[in-house]
Image (cartoon, grey):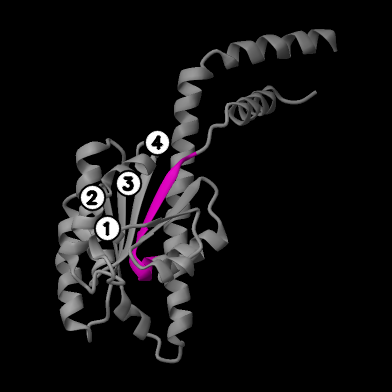
Amino acid sequence: MRDIDDVRKNVEELLIEEFGIRPDVRVFAFGGGAGRIASYLTEKKIDGAKIIAINVDENGLKNVSADKKMLLGKDVLGEHRDTEGEVKVAEYIIDKSKAWIMEEANNADVIVLLASLGGGMGTGGIIETAKILKERVKKPIVAIMILPFSIEERRRKIAIETANRIREIVTKAIILDSDTLLMSPNLPVAKAYGIMYERIHDFIAKITNITRLEIEKKFRELYLSEVDAVVEKVYNEMMIAA
């Protein structure tokens, strides 16, 4: 005869599966650099995470793999291909598209904002989206930001200023420095980037798993409070019958 704890666990797992209890983590990836990471995350798959790639570069977006793609800014940029590094232009484009952002963010359990900083769409996109979400949703917001190499002085200065701004807005900020890719001189840069992408994958997988555990905990508290009594009653009846 199976132990009562095993029976209880099995009942809980069946109910959780039947009710479709699963996390909903939305990952917004802004710009070309984050688009490459979006492709990596999509190909590796994270159960419970939806990857959304956002860009103004139509050709760049075509080469990205994601659960959803948002091509923004055509009404603003006209014939221009992208924001040409203008942060304020990217912020304006996101502000005009906030209804699309909110449509994806409203039902999420946790929101992750992902960007390589220093350029236009990545920097302006994550700044404006963080501000919009902070005002409109009561969900945890995690920002994962990548700083450019120190040799890119102007872009790095913009990136550091942006990271400091974002840190004040979101629930949790994770900052990754591209300079660390140069710390192993014998490691090809492409492979070093792969290690960084894997770290980002692990961050998001961990966020998703923690979210899953929290949702299941709340589900048990709200809906499974009487399961123990029912399981014990059925188990005792089985023991008597045996």
* Image depth: mark 3 or mark 4 in front: 3
Element under label 2? helix
Residue to which mark 1 is pinned: 75
Compared with 193, 211 (above or below) is above
Relative horizontal placement of residue 105, taking residue 198 as reference (left or right)? left
* Image depth: mark 2 or mark 1 in front: 1
Residue to which mark 4 is pinned: 107
Answer whether labels 3 and 4 touch (C-beta < 8 Å): no
Answer with mark 2 or mark 1, whichever residue precedes in sequence: 1
Query: Percent from the top left, x then y, of residue 166?
Result: 20, 56
**Real-space Cα separation, disc 1 to disc 3, in angstroms:** 17 Å
* Image depth: mark 3 or mark 2 in front: 2
Residue to which mark 2 is pinned: 96
Foreground: 122 or 184? 122
**Real-space Cα separation, disc 2 to disc 4, in angstroms:** 21 Å
**Real-space Cα separation, disc 3 to disc 2, in angstroms:** 10 Å
Q: Is residue 88 magenta?
A: no
The type of residue carrying mark 2 is Lys
User: Image quadrant for the C terminus?
Assistant: top right
- The segment highlighted magenta reads 23-34
Answer with mark 1 or mark 3, whichever residue precedes in sequence: 1
**Real-space Cα separation, disc 2 to disc 1, in angstroms:** 10 Å
Query: Percent from the top left, x then y, of residue 234?
Result: 71, 11
Residue to which mark 3 is pinned: 101
Task: Tell me the residue at 27%/46% (across/down).
Answer: 98
Answer with mark 1 or mark 4, whichever residue precedes in sequence: 1
The type of residue carrying mark 4 is Asn
